[in-house]
Image (tube, rainbow, N blue to C red):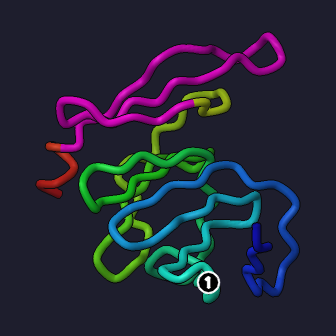
Amino acid sequence: MERCHTNLADPLTHFKDIVFGGSSVYVATDNGVVASQTGENWRVLTDGIGTRVVIDKFAVDGTTVYGAGNAGSYRLNTRMQWEQISSEVPNAIISDLVIANDKLYSATDLISGVKEEGLFYISLEENEKK
C-alpha cells in the first residue's frame, strides 16, 4: 500500500469521507475537500469565491458529486467548484448522504442530547431549475 500525500499547505487531522465520481477520487477532510485523478496530484476544491468548503459526507449521482456539511448542501459544478444548493442545515452531524428519486437525503446523528436526529431531504429537481 502506498501512502497518499495531498501536498496541502494546511495540515489535515481528520478524514471524513471518500468517494469516486467519474474519473476522480474526492476526499473530505476537516480542512476542505481534495480531488485527484491520479492519486499523486491533488487539488483543493473551493466555491466560486475561493473559499474551502468543509464537507462531512458525499453522494454521487452518475458523475455529479454532492456534499453536505455544517454550512449546507453542495453540488460540484463542471468547473470543479462547489455550488451551494441549500443553506438549510439540520442541527446535527450528517452521518449519511444518499440520492433517491431526485432528492438528496441527509441522515443525522444526535449531538449532546439537545439537537434533533432524523432524516432530511432537499429536492434536486427544484435546485436544477435555479
According to the image, label 1 marks what residue?
Answer: 42
Residue at screen point 61% across, 73% down: 34
Residue occupying the point 70% across, 16% down? 110
Most extreme residue toward the top is 113
- Check the picture and name the quadrant holding the C terminus: bottom left
Extreme residue in the front direction: 1
Left or right of 107? Residue 30 is right
In-image side of 114 versus 53 (left or right) = right
Q: Tell me if residue 66 is in the magenta stretch.
A: no
Residue 95: percent from the left, percent from the top? Answer: 61, 30
Amino acid carrying label 1: it is Trp
Residue plotted at (73% across, 80% down): 6
Element marked by disc 1: loop
Question: Seen in the image, is 23 located left or right of residue 100?
Answer: right
Residue 9: percent from the left, percent from the top? 82, 87
In the image, is residue 27 above or below residue 127? below
For residue 33, side relative to residue 49 (left or right): right
Towards the viewer: 88 or 34? 34
Residue beneath the point at 69% across and 49% down: 16
Q: Is residue 41 above or below residue 25?
A: below
- x then y, percent, for residue 11: 87, 74
Q: Is residue 104 magenta?
A: yes
Q: Residues within 10 Å of mark 1 (few under 14, many from 20)?
A: many
Magenta residue span = 96-124
